[in-house]
Image (cartoon, grey):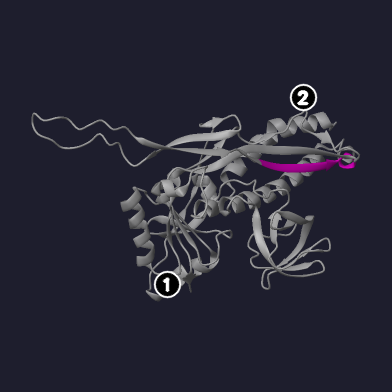
């Protein structure tokens, strides 16, 4: 007979390993390239000493002259708080009892709940990788009843629960997205959006300023990074080209060469928005060039630029290309994905006052880039 205890055992012993593997390798191609490690985690913080430049104790001299003076490596101290990532599944008591004598039905129930969690986590983790750590999804352009027109809907999806802020003040909380019109940029939510005006900002529920340090934060040169003022070290300043215009091979290769020459990076990943993907395909077709396709880790496939994977990702801003050396990125974590447990070791808990049981997956981590100057972004690319 299926019971809450047998459900907990299944979640711990069977499902957790599979879910962890999928979240770590199937989120998107960029996640599969980033090493995950528990090093440099101290309590609730990541503290990492990152070397700057090269050792200074080198030089030439006379046959019997003085040796070069010893100068060790220079270091920057990166400090970042661990971010708390959560995901919940919910099973009603009625569903458990209805499938008590049918293990197949109960397995289908767990599979359905975990599939939903994986889909939501895949979307959210992928979005955070390219985000700026604030949880910002878009800005409001206009509002009418339960409808709001946004400046960008690439981060929106049906079922997402959002908060709307006026600066630092929450105006609407817990509004669930019911539909997204991607041609007009109009999003419908399940409650009236009162008090919201143009210029207000949409965030993921409860996530404002609590997300991992994604590419948006790494490439925002106006703000400190990992507790360090960027003006103190050129290593914290990525290579950026704006208003690029029409895409061509020389533009891309120039940035790749500059990264290799100026920072010693070895570019191994290029991420692009949909319009840049089509611009690249159009450019190649104009010159009757074949587009190489390559297989990536995690079962992904992508186009290739001179042997470097060129990957489309929905979360890359329009007209943008990221040129990355992913060996400089590490996801530092206190532990891998785990279920929250009570003091008795239980992971399924009854929601107070409701006939449902919930289980919560958690991971404490943040993304650290050792060499921001070894990464590049081209924006303003036109068709």
Residue 44 coordinates in the image, percent (x, y): 61, 32
Outermost residue toward the bottom in this view: 286
Q: Which residue is mark 2?
A: 343
When asked about the image quadrant of residue 136, the answer is bottom right
Disc number for residue 283: 1
Judged from the image, the secondary structure of the residue bearing numbered disc 1 is helix
Evaluate whether residue 167 shows in this view: yes
Considering depth in this image, is 15 or 252 the residue closer to the camera? 252
Crowding around mark 2 (Cα neighbors within 10 Å: few <14, some 14 to 19, many 20+) is few
Disc number for residue 116: none
Considering depth in this image, is 11 or 178 the residue closer to the camera? 178
Would you say 352 lies left or right of 27 here? right
Give the distance between the C-alpha atoms of the residues marked 2 and 1, in whole angstroms. Answer: 60 Å
Residues shaded magenta = 85-95
Q: Give the number of the mark in front: 2 or 1.
A: 2
Would you say 291 lies left or right of 81 here? left
The N terminus appears in which quarter of the rendering? top right
Identify the residue shown where x is 40% and y is 76%. Answer: 286
Evaluate whether residue 162 shows in this view: no
Identify the residue shown where x is 62% and y is 43%. Answer: 23
When asked about the image quadrant of residue 337, the answer is top right
The mark that comes first in sequence, 2 or 1, is 1
Residue 120 coordinates in the image, percent (x, y): 69, 50
When asked about the image quadrant of residue 348, the answer is top right
Considering depth in this image, is 182 or 328 the residue closer to the camera? 328
With respect to residue 187, does 342 lie above or below?
A: above
Judged from the image, the secondary structure of the residue bearing numbered disc 2 is loop
Residue 11 coordinates in the image, percent (x, y): 73, 34
């Amino acid at each position: 007979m299926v019971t809450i205890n047998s459900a907990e055992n299944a979640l711990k012993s069977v499902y957790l390993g599979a879910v962890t593997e999928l979240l770590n390798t199937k989120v998107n191609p960029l996640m599969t390239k980033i090493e995950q490690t528990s090093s440099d985690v101290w309590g609730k913080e990541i503290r990492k000493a990152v070397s700057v430049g090269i050792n200074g104790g080198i030089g030439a001299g006379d046959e019997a002259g003085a040796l070069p003076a010893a100068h060790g490596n220079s270091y920057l101290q990166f400090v970042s708080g661990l971010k708390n990532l959560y995901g919940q599944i919910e099973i009603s008591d009625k569903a458990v009892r209805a499938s008590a004598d049918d293990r197949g039905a109960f397995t289908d129930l767990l599979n359905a709940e975990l599939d939903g969690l994986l889909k939501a986590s895949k979307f959210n983790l992928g979005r955070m990788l390219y985000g700026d750590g604030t949880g910002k999804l878009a800005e409001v352009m206009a509002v009418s009843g339960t409808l709001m027109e946004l400046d960008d809907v690439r981060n929106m999806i049906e079922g997402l629960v959002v908060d709307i802020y006026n600066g630092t003040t929450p105006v609407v909380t817990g509004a669930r997205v019911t539909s997204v019109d991607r041609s007009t940029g109009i999003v419908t939510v399940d409650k009236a959006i009162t008090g919201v005006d143009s210029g207000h900002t949409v965030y993921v529920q409860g996530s404002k300023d609590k997300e991992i340090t994604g590419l948006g934060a790494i490439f925002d040169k106006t703000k400190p990074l990992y507790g360090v003022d960027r003006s103190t070290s050129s290593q914290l300043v990525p290579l950026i080209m704006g208003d690029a215009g029409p895409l061509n091979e020389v533009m891309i290769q120039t940035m790749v060469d500059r990264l290799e020459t100026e920072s010693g990076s070895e570019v191994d990943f290029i991420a692009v928005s949909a319009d840049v993907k089509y611009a690249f395909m159009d450019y190649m077709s104009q010159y009757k060039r074949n587009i190489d396709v390559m297989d990536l880790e995690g079962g992904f496939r992508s186009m290739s630029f001179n042997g470097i994977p060129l990957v489309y990702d929905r979360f890359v801003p329009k007209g943008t290309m990221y040129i990355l050396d992913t060996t400089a990125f590490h996801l530092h974590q206190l532990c891998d994905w785990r279920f929250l447990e009570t003091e008795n070791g239980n992971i399924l808990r009854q929601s107070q006052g409701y006939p449902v049981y919930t289980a919560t997956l958690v991971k404490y981590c943040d993304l650290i880039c050792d060499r921001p100057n070894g990464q590049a972004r081209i924006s303003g690319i036109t068709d």
